Image: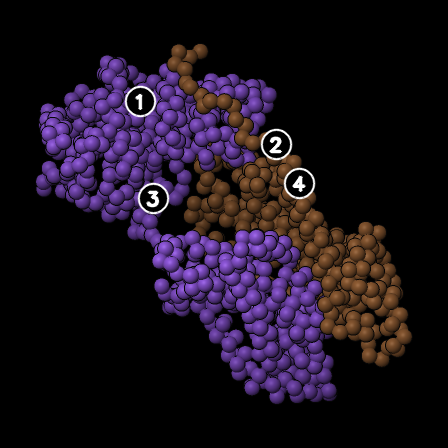
Amino acid sequence: MAKLSFVRRPRGVTQYVCLVLLAALAFLALFGHTIWAAQAARFDPARPLQPASSAHILGTDQIGRDVLARVLNASLLSVELALMAAAIGVVIGVTIGVGQAVLGPFLRRLLASAITISLAFPGLLLALLVNAIFGAGPTGAVLGVGIALIPAFARFSQALASSAAGSEYVAAARVLGVGRVRIMVRHILPNIAKPLLLTALGSVGTSLVGISALSFLGLGVQPPNYDWGELLQAGLQVVYIRPMSAIGPGLMIVLAGLAFNLAGEAFAGSHPRISVGEFTGSAGLTRRFALATSRLANRRPDRAADADELVVAASASPKLLSVRDLHVAFPGRSGPVAAVRDVDLAIVPGERLGVVGESGSGKTTLALALACLLERPATWRWGEFTFDGESVKADAHSEYRRLFGTKLGFVFQDPANSLNPAIRVGAQLAELRQVHYGASRAESRRMAVDRLREVQIPSPEIRARQYPHEFSGGMRQRAMIASGLMGSPRLLIADEPTTALDVTVQAHILRLLERVSDETGAAVLLISHDISVVVSFCHRVLVMYAGRVVEDIPSDWLVSRAAHPYTRALIHAVPDIDDLAGQPLTTIPGQPPNLENLSTGCSFAARCAFADDKCREDDPVLTALAGPHSVACWHPRPSEELADELTDAGSSNRSAL
Amino acid sequence: MSAITVDAPAGITTRGRNPWPAFAARRALRLVIGIVVVVTASFLVMQLVPGDPVRLSLGPSAPLSLVKQRRADLGLDNSLIVQYVNYWKGMFTGNFGTSILTQQSVTSIIASRIWNTVTLVAIALGLTLFFAVAIGVTVGGLTHNERRPRLLAAYRIVASTLNVVPEYLYGVGLVVIFAVTLKLLPVAGDDGFKSLILPSLAISLAPIAGLSRIVRVQTEEVLSQEYIQFARSKRLPASRIYWRHALPNLLTSALTVGGILLGVLVASTVVVENVFALPGLGSTVVTAITQRDYPLAQGALLILGGSVVLVNLIIDVIVSLLDPRSLMRDS
């Protein structure tokens, strides 16, 4: 572990400023006394309170001493006292904070609450209390400020130590039988040394400002000795005639305090951030996919008929929502990164459309774009966008408030965070009615209760008056759906509505969505990791890869007729948990695409067993394959092959058993 | 209405009962502990003084008989326990002892000065909360989603610099600007409301800068929460999203920090009253400490410390009213 890694080359303006200030301060403290002591002591009663001049840059004081020389000469004492106070606070504080780990549980709790109580008091009051005991003077001031720092350091080091103590290497050391004290000294202290040292550095600034305050009040350094605080007091006495004599020492206190405080902050952030490839997709197939496909076999067969009808009807019936040539990008390290590319999409009234793909494939971005909820820093454009008969412009979201507010409901992924914790659930539902329909508060509340009842929330009158934290996860998701029903919804977009819920609740929510869709005629766009959920719930499935729709297929055809190698890989990944062993298809060779650096050609080419030169040069567009089935691939797989593969895989495994 | 029934989770569980009584009990306990700590600490001041406090106070030239008499007056000859009990008795009867130097009752000295300090803190707190929230939310809203990066950088530098400047330097700076250069406002002394303007500014500038940074970060965080997205998905007007949906979630953290700042404000008055020669509790403490008038210092520190305890309690209650979740977390 690089314990002192913050002593590295400085980066950023703040760090340079800090270093320069600290160096200047160190120079003044070390040599200021030698250089300016004599000049600071020389007095000239004939020239009191001189204005600023080239001889006396800050003027002179009451008995004709040079103020600047005195200010510079005071550096040593000011810094010295601050260091002493900080040392008292840090040493005692850290000893208490770290050492309490070796105490018994009772004493530890007692100590912890003592620290909590003393933390509630501002440092200056503690310092004054100590100062009152020891009397006005530098000793009282240093002790006062130092002791006032103890509680904060005790708490800080205790928090650091306990988080380090919970880490794996300490657990490992404990398993190896290393003693408490040795763990503390060898394993915990070195790992909390850096944040502690930085905070200690900052506290020197705090001490300096604090001791200067006490000196300024006449409670610290006493004349004829002087530090910056004492000089400031002297300057304030003559501030009317010679404001510079107060500004000089004041400036020094600010700069010195700033130097230490900034150093503590600026270097704290100097370790490189772990860069998370936000748009680069997840590593390989997600486990969710693998597990989900195992449930494929259980899909409901009766859906086949109406799906076919619906899909066939789709081409003729009026579109509820249609978008052409949709593009969304996010700023990346080198230029914009496309999250959604070239998407054409249409939803007919009452349709249940699913979108599947790995994390990072652009599913959520697509959902937000369709709901007109994208925000900067994302950038987006589309060729044409209509929703419920109205044409929507890409750059004027606010014009369509009422349209989207009343006709589109959005169910977010995480029910724990998607309802406002500070507002009662009923009010959160009611406001939609108030804002878009001008309904009265009472009327909207009544309607909210009705909607909560419709989504099967028990005792809706009571529930409406509760806060989201009083709801369970499943109930919050129901409330979200209820909110979508407050208008006259034509489309519900559900972005992984069941991912954060446990399996039985998942089923309830999906059945509720199904029922709502049947009863209101609203279309549903369901985004999911879970291919089995999508197949059982939706009429039609879009498969996304690297921001593009690569396959558009009726859900009942998905298993038997998927034509895109990627879709097939997804389905193939795990037909059944038992078949996992020995299946080469559990991984798709190669890496998921890096959206920041997409090559020309098909983005799946690098991982595709069927890719040839054409694939690597030209990106295939989504083309109709058979009826409602489209695929973006130069070499779509024939459906029989898949069936064969499945049988082979199944039988070979069975024979292996 | 429905053919397919959706099974609801069994039972209506309103998680837990009314959390308020437990909350009140915990806060009452904390209040009592806080008061005991403050009273004991202030009691100990005189006991811990190295040497004879009365001798230190009256000086080496004071006659022994006077010292002895004052010791007797203060009850210093009694045992520690008796003194402690008497100290508490005094507390309940509003008797904080008598000044060693002036023989005046400490209670009357404090009573005559406390209002300046209370007004000062109240004005400063109002200024701090108002400006910190206004500035923090505005900057947070303007720079949300990586917009206006230069504004954010400038704000960061200015706010973090202003935050570390101590109140007495603001005091001196304001004196130089407003009283010496512009000659607009009184610099020192007790001249009604006008003489409170500069002192309250001096103690609130650093807290405004510090608290506004916290509010900005909170704003940023709240605005990127999913519940704000949900509010946007309902296409509420921007003003409603800010004030109805974002602000209540910000205020709890702003107030929690504001409560700690209030304690700091109380302490800052000590320094600033001295800069502006404003007769208040703070200047009383400082004079008492320099003159070693221990009973007076004890009384004033007790009141300052006690007010910090009370203020913390009030803030806790307000936060719990605003954010019902904190009641749950609290236990």
The answer to which of A481 and A651 lies nearer the viewer is A651
| Residue at x-position 27% and y-position 37% | A287
Residue B25 is marked as: 4
Q: Please tell me whether mark 1 sits on a helix, a strand or a loop.
A: helix
Q: CA distance from mark 2 to mark 1?
A: 41 Å
> How many residues crowd around disc 4 within 10 Å: few (fewer than 14), some, or many (20 or more)?
few
Image marks 2 and 4: residues in contact by CB distance under 8 Å: no
Name the chain letter of the residue that bears numbered label 1: A
- What residue is pinned by disc 3? A330
How far from the left and from the top, in percent, is residue A462? 57, 23
Image marks 3 and 4: residues in contact by CB distance under 8 Å: no
Q: Nearer the viewer, mark 1 or mark 3?
A: 1
Q: Please tell me whether mark 4 sits on a helix, a strand or a loop.
A: helix
A645 lies left or right of B210: left
Residue B18 is marked as: 2
Asked if labels 3 and 4 share a chain, the reply is no
Q: Amino acid at mark 2?
A: Asn
Q: CA distance from mark 2 to mark 4?
A: 13 Å
Q: Please tell me whether mark 2 sits on a helix, a strand or a loop.
A: loop
- What residue is pinned by disc 1? A537
Q: Is residue B199 visible?
A: no
> How many residues crowd around disc 3 within 10 Å: few (fewer than 14), some, or many (20 or more)?
some
Q: Amino acid at mark 3?
A: Phe
| Residue at x-position 24% and y-position 34% | A290
Q: Which chain is purple?
A: A
> How many residues crowd around disc 2 within 10 Å: few (fewer than 14), some, or many (20 or more)?
few
How far from the left and from the top, in percent, is residue B182? 70, 63
Q: CA distance from mark 2 to mark 3?
A: 47 Å
Q: CA distance from mark 4 to mark 1?
A: 51 Å
How far from the left and from the top, in percent, is residue B18? 61, 32
Instruction: Name the residue furthest front.
Output: A177
Image marks 2 and 3: residues in contact by CB distance under 8 Å: no
